[in-house]
Image: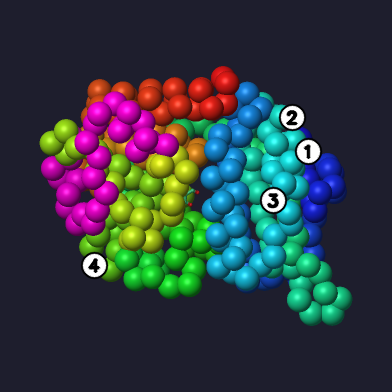
Amino acid sequence: MQCIVDGVVVTPEAASISIFDLGLLRGYGCFEAQRAYGGKVFRLERHLDRLERSAAALDIELPRRSEIAGWVREIAAANGDCIVRLFVTGGYPDEPVSPPRTFAFAESVPEVPAGLRFLPLAAPWHPGGVSSELTGAKTMSYAPNLRATREAQHAGFDDALLYSRDGDLLEGPTFCIGWFRRGVLETPSLDLGVLASITREAVLEAATGLHIPVAEGRYGRNVLAEADEVFAISTVKEVTSVVAVGEQSFRPGADTARVADAFREIVATETGT
Ligand SMILES: Cc1ncc(COP(=O)(O)O)c(C=O)c1O
């Protein structure tokens, strides 16, 4: 498995950055997780757009976009079906000054359970509709997200499903959520500070292509009591049925399967797989 650090191809053993880097010390940095199908990255340009927004929000200077794109493509091409992780750290601002560091590597695509089980958890740290400078930025400060995942896993669930201080349904620590209610595909709107997920965007296109009505909005966490089908959305999970949210159970359904298939068709068309 090859890694690229500041444009140099190195082995995993040789891939390192300073312990003084602000990415490590303060979580000051940004990242992307991209999926390669048959060696081709799905919607690389959209990922790079989001990386640029994240870096601008953090005031971190990125290497040239064409260079970053080349590194990601190189790793994808060498690994076929994989997740390409890309990070840009804050660097080491004191003497000797180190500029932001950029590194990328491939991970194998993890096995995702066919029916996911989520524990609803309050996320008081989440913007939840109150915007700040960093809302929407995919920064390296993921400690609250990881903690929520661990709490859910300790309680026997696959992951957490987060809701805001106001009780609005938001997203998971690393995925978006959607559901079908009375034939409409509903999902929390981006103005809640939910990450502008690349997969979510493609899934909404897929649903629109199938003439399925789509609604983005603010929904109280109890909305799922009226949902017929629930599904998780992300680069890693693609479209995966949810079979439990806390005490509530759901069946994987035909509407989710149709949207998942249409999403895969978009992927196949764009990646030539
Ligand atoms: C908080 C959060 N929401 C949603 C997503 C899904 O985004 P994408 O479809 O771009 O993977 C992620 C991905 O890492 C995430 O971290």
Check disc 3 and report the residue beneath it: 65
Secondary structure under tag 4 reads loop
> Do the numbered discs 1 and 3 sit on residues whose CB atoms are within 8 Å?
no
Question: What's the residue at 58%, 43% (across, down)?
Answer: 45
Q: Quadrant of residue 129?
A: bottom left
Q: Amino acid at mark 2?
A: Ala
Number of the front mark, 3 or 2: 3
Which mark is first along the chain, 4 or 2?
A: 2
Spatial CA distance of label 3 from label 4 is: 38 Å
Q: Amino acid at mark 1?
A: Gln
Check disc 2 and report the residue beneath it: 78
Number of the front mark, 3 or 4: 3
Q: Quadrant of residue 212?
A: top left
Spatial CA distance of label 3 from label 2 is: 20 Å
Task: Specify whether residue 116 is in view.
Answer: no
Residue 213: x percent and y percent? 22, 36
Check disc 4 and report the residue beneath it: 166
Give the quadrant of the C terminus: top right
Q: Amino acid at mark 3?
A: Arg
Check disc 1 and report the residue beneath it: 2
Q: Amino acid at mark 4?
A: Asp
Spatial CA distance of label 1 from label 2 is: 8 Å
Q: Quadrant of residue 264?
A: top left
